[in-house]
Amino acid sequence: MKKHSILFFLCILTLVASCKKEPRVKQIKPENIGVLDPLPSWNDGKTKNDIIAFVKNVTTEGNPDFVPVEDRIATFDNDGTLWSEQPLYAQLRYVLDEIKVLAPEHPEWKTTEPFKSVLEGNVEAVFKSGKEGIVKMGMASSTNIESGAFRESVKKWMVKAKHPRFNRPYNEVIYQPMIELLAYLETNGFTNFIVTGSDIDFMRAWATETYGIPSHRIIGSMVETEYDNTDGKASIIRLKGSVLADRYNGKPIGIYRHIGKKPIFAAGNSDGDLEMLHYTDTNKYPSIKLFVHHTDSVREWAYDRNSPIGGLNEGLDEAIAKNWTIADMKNDWNTIFSFQK
Amino acid sequence: MKKHSILFFLCILTLVASCKKEPRVKQIKPENIGVLDPLPSWNDGKTKNDIIAFVKNVTTEGNPDFVPVEDRIATFDNDGTLWSEQPLYAQLRYVLDEIKVLAPEHPEWKTTEPFKSVLEGNVEAVFKSGKEGIVKMGMASSTNIESGAFRESVKKWMVKAKHPRFNRPYNEVIYQPMIELLAYLETNGFTNFIVTGSDIDFMRAWATETYGIPSHRIIGSMVETEYDNTDGKASIIRLKGSVLADRYNGKPIGIYRHIGKKPIFAAGNSDGDLEMLHYTDTNKYPSIKLFVHHTDSVREWAYDRNSPIGGLNEGLDEAIAKNWTIADMKNDWNTIFSFQK
């Protein structure tokens, strides 16, 4: 009898433990909104209420704000909106690391800027090379390569590279409240897309696994490509030259090309997202324009108007003037990263 | 009592009538394959068997050919694969009609080729203008216009234009067996995409309603665009110049840009689809490469090697040599159009 009791107890324990293993994407039925909390990492307040009220309205048939499922398009910037972009955009970190990896094949880099400074570890000089230098490094490290091989290189980097402040892989330095928001929208019939300034192959190497968004719903900057079947492998080769710079005006263009509809929900964090929010704001349906505002210097970073990375200036003025939704990281989010819990 | 019997009878009748209204996209559960026929317009035989066996294998866990749901990508050409492309590509018909509509605003067209011949109804001379003339007409009729306004124009045309042989709107001249195939794949966890040489906005004006494929899964040729918010309407303007010619090499490039994965199922009908089929054939997973072969001069058309529209020459040789799947319209399809039933 005693043995059976212990076994029974162990069974119950196992059951409880297995219940605790929640999948990342919580399935919350619309009728449970308000009963279960779909956004547990968001503090109660205006921002959270506005988002939940919006989702409730657009999903309730008969509500004047109702939006048919096929038009519930949501678009999310990545750097600074879904994951940390400080102290350096992750893709730029990848490019700098990759230049060191590729250096033995390019002896000329020892004497050519901005490569010389990268190899010497002179970060300050690298940044003096400006946008032109960054593009040069990006093209040198990430083109004339088959797209699949490039993604493999990014995947390898993602496994070994560590975020300098949090000492974790970059794809763990993601905002828990935004992960919950993605799941909440998807559960309510939204189709989520990533619309990022980063390269589309760089993103597709890891973002599906991290955010649960399939590769055809990842939109990013694109280089020229050519189709090559001379070796019978039928592959896409990445070439120098840009097909889409997916920031500022490029974001609505990327959305037009890949989605063909205006979003009813768009989230960004910098002036580079402002045109995407304008595009969303002119939808015939009601919409949410959300800025993630970096206000937490303790748990993450505090920056906006004067930041060279993720600057939010015009966008902040407009968001305040037009009563758009602002997620104040310090006040609206009780958890930023799941590893900080 | 009698009154109740009549009411009861009417209820039953209503019920039977409502049951007959089958949705276009039949939902067939995997376990019913072989019990219910998922492809009723396909005759029993090798082609149908090959397709069904493939779908069964890639969807059966434990089968060596099993493919995870997220990699079940299927791509379909449109002209000649999902709808009739004879005697003239529908988009070209639209362009010719539109030139007549726009002529009053362009007095110079009366004396400029190929517009002069279009306005005079001299179709032979129009075709002598060749590819260059066609591009000229396309750009003249379909650019310098807001993308939404262009789609509206296509929608209006689709309502009033009639296919010259079947005297029906073009979006009814669609192949019933392929509609069943789309539904069959979707039901089995495939994600279907259209990959067409036609303009992406031309397609997005009607294809979602016709095929049940959302706009973000429609890939087509694209013109240059610019984002314009000067009027506060945040719109995309179609410009002269090409961003993607989605045929031949352009099809794998379109698939790479929009999907980011190789298909495991690709269907086309002309040499312009051959690169898409090569791309599919080099997937690490097993795959189906399907050519719709136009062999039915009675119910549709019979053409292949020497046709100026939808020519299938190299593709046919390769399909035979490599044992790809060929849907012989005359022999494999018991119904071509639902209106011919």
Image (cartoon, coloured by chain):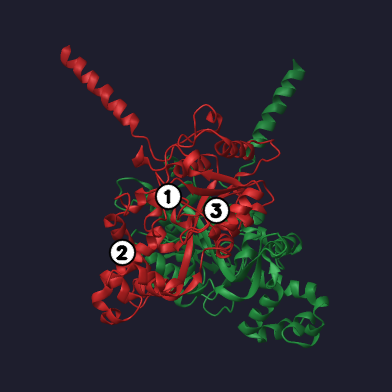
Chain colours: A green, B red
Q: Is residue A238 above or below residue A136?
A: above
Residues marked 1 and 3 touching at CB (< 8 Å):
no
Give x and y (percent) for residue B210: 38, 49
**Which residue is rendered at x = 79% and y = 88% of the image?**
A111
Give x and y (percent) for residue B150: 34, 66
> Which residue was labeled with disc 3?
A41
- Assign the N terminus of chain A to one quadrant of the image: top right
Front residue of B126/B247: it is B126
Q: Residues within 10 Å of mark 2 (few under 14, many from 20)?
A: some
The image quadrant of residue A31 is top left
Q: Is residue B328 above or below residue B17?
A: below
Q: Is residue B234 visible?
A: no
Disc number lying in front (1 or 3): 1
Q: Is residue A273 above or below residue B5?
A: below
Chain letter for the residue marked with disc 2 in the picture: B
At label 2, the amino acid type is Ser
Residues marked 2 and 3 touching at CB (< 8 Å):
no
Residues marked 2 and 1 touching at CB (< 8 Å):
no
- Which numbered tag is attached to residue A5? none
At label 1, the amino acid type is Trp
> Which residue was labeled with disc 1?
B301
Front residue of B314/B93: it is B314
> Which residue was labeled with disc 2?
B153
Marks 2, 1 in one chain: yes
Q: Is residue B19 visible?
A: yes
